[in-house]
Amino acid sequence: MRILIVEDDKKIASFIKRGLKEEGYSVDNAFDGEEGHFMATTNDYDLILLDLMIPKMDGLSLCKKLRQARLETPILMLTAKDDVKDKVEGFDSGADDYLTKPFAFEELLARTRSHLRKKSDQSPTRYQVGDLSLDFLTHKVERAGKEIFLTMKEFALLEYLMRNAGKIVTRTMISEHVWDIHFDVSTNVIDVYINYLRHKIDTDPKKKLIQTVRGRGYILQA
């Protein structure tokens, strides 16, 4: 899952990003409304965390503009304004939720999971390719009935491959959805993690699921 944080306070943005990445999410930052609009409309995000008091374009204006562009990504507003009037304005602008600063990170995380869960109701939460299964909600992975334990990044990579089973995914596509926008695609980190997965899920040489498509990327298929 990929999340965009639009927050001009770099200390707060860094804190939220670090916490979400520790939970296995891919996270990007925008530090003003114009940058947030550009990133939200040019990238595919599963959730947007939007501060109201941001420069160049305030959060309410940005939210309205994104909704006018028919962007349906859930938007969770973060603000120090706690008046009922302010909350009503936030919801009327198109926000899905409203969290008042200061907030406990555990509550932000719970609300994040809630919105992602609602979105996942429209798509499978359990993926199956051959005898390999992955449950997004429980983070459980099994191959031929045997549980496989993955790190957060390995799980995120496998989830992306399984969501796109049967399709070729390039290194650029993987970097955008599993890492963040600043990821250096010239490194071999993706290949390293692909090998980590192969060592854990492709131990049977006769039933390899992850295949390399030379010059293009990878494909996962039974």
Image: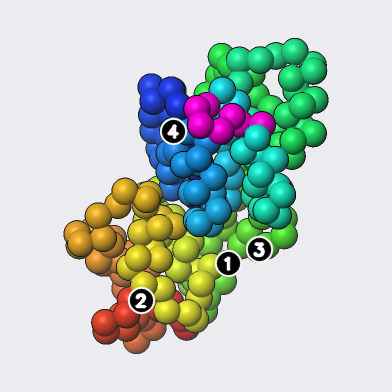
Residue 27 showing in the rendered view: yes
Identify the residue at horizontal 50%, vertical 40% (top origin).
34
Query: Label 2 vs label 1: CA separation?
Result: 18 Å
Looking at the rendered image, the disc whose residue lies closer to the viewer, 3 or 2, is 2
Query: How far apart are the alpha carbons under marks 4 and 1?
Result: 35 Å
Can you name the residue that lies furthest to the front here? 56
Front of the two marks 4 and 1: 4
Q: In the image, what residue occupies the spot 52% across and 26% down? A: 54
Q: Name the residue under label 3.
A: 124
Q: Is mark 4 on a helix, strand or loop?
A: loop
Q: The residue under label 1 is which amino acid type?
A: Tyr
Q: Mark 4 points at which residue?
A: 31
Q: Name the residue under label 1.
A: 127
Which segment is the magenta one? 54-60
Q: How far apart are marks 3 and 4 (CA)?
A: 33 Å
**Mark positioned earlier in the residue sequence (2 or 1):** 1
Cα distance between the residues tagged 3 and 2: 22 Å
Does dot 2 land on a helix, a strand or a loop?
strand
Q: Estimate the spatial distance between the alpha carbons at disc 4 and disc 2, rounded to whole Å.
A: 34 Å
Name the one closer to the observer, 33 or 127: 33
Q: Where is residue 173 in the image (x, y as percent from the top left)?
A: 40, 66
Say what amino acid the circle numbered 2 marks. Tyr
**Mark before the other along the chain sequence, 4 or 1:** 4
Q: In this view, does 48 lie to the left or right of 169?
A: right
Magenta stretch contains residue 58: yes
Q: Are there few (<14), some (14-19), or many (20+) residues within 10 Å of tag 3?
A: few
The x and y percentages for residue 179 are 37, 52
The answer to which of 120 and 91 lies nearer the viewer is 91
Q: Where is residue 53 in the image (x, y as percent from the top left)?
A: 56, 23
**Residue 190: % across, % down:** 28, 62
